[in-house]
Amino acid sequence: MAAIDPLWWVVGLIGLGTFVWRGAFLVFGRGLRMPDLVRRGLNYVPPAVFAALVLPGLMQWQADGTLDTPRLIAGAVAGAVAWRTRGTIPTLIAGMVVLWSLRALMPV
Amino acid sequence: MMAAITPFGVTAGVAGLDAGLGPALTMGMSMIVFAGASQLASIQLINAGAAVPLVVLTALIINLRMLMYSAHLAPYFRHLPLGWRSLMAYVLTDQAYALTISRVMTEDSDRFNHWFFLGVGIPLWVVWQLSTAFGYWAGTAMPPDWELGFIVPLIFLALLMMSINSRPGVIAAVVAGSLSVLGRGLPAGLGLTLAALAGIAAGVLAEGRRGGD
């Protein structure tokens, strides 16, 4: 019998655990009634989680301890575009074009 | 949205190649886990030689937000049979959640909501697999100074702006975002989870102060 790469265990456990998270209420907890406070809180899951995911990606410090300004500016422009257009593609284009332009203008 | 996640998936493929995972494990991870941020984080940890429990724990903390998505979506799909709900759980992603929740909470909601969900979730799954495979195959041909990794926060930025529809929502986003930046020194995923919970609490408090709406 060929040895199985132990990393399959890692992948399998992460996959299983993630499915438990995803199915916690959708699949397994159908009968669960949520208290009113929790239900109100759930309405703020999208802005809170997405903000917590995005901000550290826009504010990055370089090796010399200074803030990566082009990234931050590109993020701010993309944020304004996202707010106006409510679309993913215009946001991506704006963010990448501004980032590449600033990198070209301000060589490290 | 499909075009937007392609570079994200490609990045996961390139990361798998760089870490020497081999094609089977890289693709297996995309199919079994199917959650980009946790895949990138766990590949980095594996590459750094981290212990198995640490890798698994980190990935699961990063994916803890799926639990909140599940709780938020569940009431709208309670009537569906088990098979449907299981399939929906498997293809639940940030994007499928964001688009579906903004539909079911408005006048666009109808009895086809579950088809809408799968209409986002399944094409995303297919694009994710194809782009991971492409990333693994094209591998190091991708110049690092294109900074394609920046696409990941940009995707979440678009989802964030789409999700803000009230003043308490703005407050939730500002609190969670700032705390997440401050908590970046914490073990991966933990800062994110704590910041999100604080943001949610701030949103509820802000709503209560206005007498609710």
Image (cartoon, coloured by chain):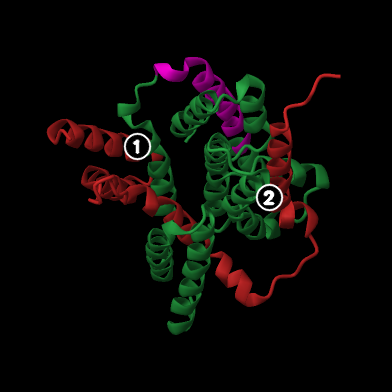
Give whichever of B92, A65 is nearer the camera.
Answer: A65
- Which of these two is toward me, B18 or B113? B18
Label 2: chain letter: A
Residue extending furthest left? A105
Q: Quadrant of the C terminus of chain A?
A: top left
Give the residue at x 73% y 56%.
A24
The answer to if B209 sits in the magenta stretch is no
Horizontally, is A104 left or right of A89 in the view?
Answer: left
Say which residue label 2 marks.
Answer: A22
Determine the secondary structure under disc 2.
helix
Residue A47 occupies which quadrant of the picture?
A: bottom left
The mark that comes first in sequence, 2 or 1, is 2
What hue does chain A carry in this figure?
A: red
Where B154 sits versus A32, above or below? Answer: above
Reading the image, the residue beneath label 1 is: A92
Q: What's the residue type where badge 1 is placed?
A: Leu
Image location of residue B115, percent across then percent down = 66, 40
Q: Which residues are magenta?
A: B121-141
| Residue B185 versus residue B131 in the image, above or below | below
Badge 2, how many Cα within 10 Å: few under 14, some, many 20+?
A: many
Please indicate whether residue B125 sits to the left or right of residue B142 in the image: right
Q: Residue at x 53, y 67 (%)?
A: B197
Quarter in which the N terminus of chain A is drawn: top right
The picture places residue A8, in percent across and down from the top left corner, at: 72, 32
* Chain B as rendered: colour: green
**Residue positioned most to the right:** A1
Q: Residue at x 61, y 41 (%)?
A: B116
Q: Nearer the viewer, residue B213 or B135?
A: B135
Q: In which quarter of the view is residue B132 placed?
A: top right
